[in-house]
Amino acid sequence: MFKVVFLDWTNIVRTVVAAVITVVSAQTLSAQEAGNAGELLDYPGTFLNGLVTAEVLMTPDKCRKLCTDRSGCVGFDHSSSTNQCRLFGGIASAREDTASTAGTRYPITGYREPTPAARPPRTFDHYANYDLFGFDLDQAAATSLTECEDYCRGNEECRAFTFNEWNQKCFLKSGTAELRLEPRATTGVLAGTAHPGYRNASVVMEYYRDYVISGSQIGNSRVVNSRDQCESMCWDREQCIAFSFSRRQRECRLFDHADNRFPRGGMESGAKIQPRP
């Protein structure tokens, strides 16, 4: 005697579909939660296994950006041999693959640690014709502003620097103070640092007899009768930092940047400066 059992296939199918939907929903939920984690972790030389949600041909940078911009993307991998980008809604595992690179929202369980992201280079705000007095950390010879800035960038304690262009000297600073008007100098302050402010002190003219200024000239040369007239023109212009007057040619030159001074007979020069404290 056989007993015939009739299965309710309708209910079985509904149950299976509901289970699948539950699993997929859980995966999507975890992906969305992970999507709020921020920047992607770098896994060079890595191929991912998991729930692939999209495949597209594009560059690795665009692939990374696409995943970063999608809240449901928990990671991506990119093949350099095929230029294929794959986005993932869930990651099960990973394996080494020299032709692939990957990025994920969170560390991959049971796999190696992600490569630390490269820290962006430190940048500096420049203040031409200003010196930063005090907080001396170190000093070195430098032939350019760029070289001096690189010295500071390479020293973790350095927060600012002053480059003395006339003497080719670089002064590294551990902190900042008020900026002092100084035609020889350009100061750099680490970006993001509060503005150091300007020294509230009288500006005077420093004179250099038988010296000529070189640098960035303001307009054309002027014809004047005396050094005093040339100096007066410089005082009348806020951007003027220095002047040179030729006694023989009665010629006046104004400068908004003075990169140096050189001996020359028959010349009268001067530069605005705030004396040292």
Image: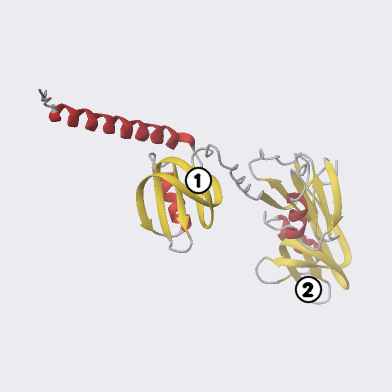
Residue 11: quarter of image? top left
Task: From the top left corner, tell me how far across and down residue 18 is, in percent.
Answer: 24, 29
* SS of the residue under disc 2: loop
Counting other residues with Cα less than 10 Å from the Cα at mark 2, is it few (<14), some (14-19), or many (20 or more)?
some
**Residue position for label 2:** 250
Residue type beneath disc 2: Arg
Residue lying at 29% horizontally and 29% vertically, measured from the top left: 22
Seen from the viewer's position, the closer of residues 227 and 277 is 277
Which residue is outermost to the front? 1
Counting other residues with Cα less than 10 Å from the Cα at mark 1, is it few (<14), some (14-19), or many (20 or more)?
some
Residue 241: quarter of image? bottom right
> Which callout, 2 or 1, points to the residue nearer the camera?
1
Colour setup of the view? secondary structure
Residue lying at 59% horizontally and 43% vertically, measured from the top left: 112
Residue 206: quarter of image? bottom right
Task: From the top left corner, tell me how far across and down residue 166 is, in percent.
Answer: 83, 61
* SS of the residue under disc 1: strand
| Among numbered discs 2 and 1, the one appearing first in the sequence | 1
In the drawing, does residue 126 fall left or right of residue 226? left
In the drawing, does residue 155 fall left or right of residue 27? right
The circle drawn on residue 94 is 1
Q: Marks 2 and 1: CB-CB under 8 Å?
A: no
The tally of labels here is 2
Is residue 181 visible to us here?
Answer: no
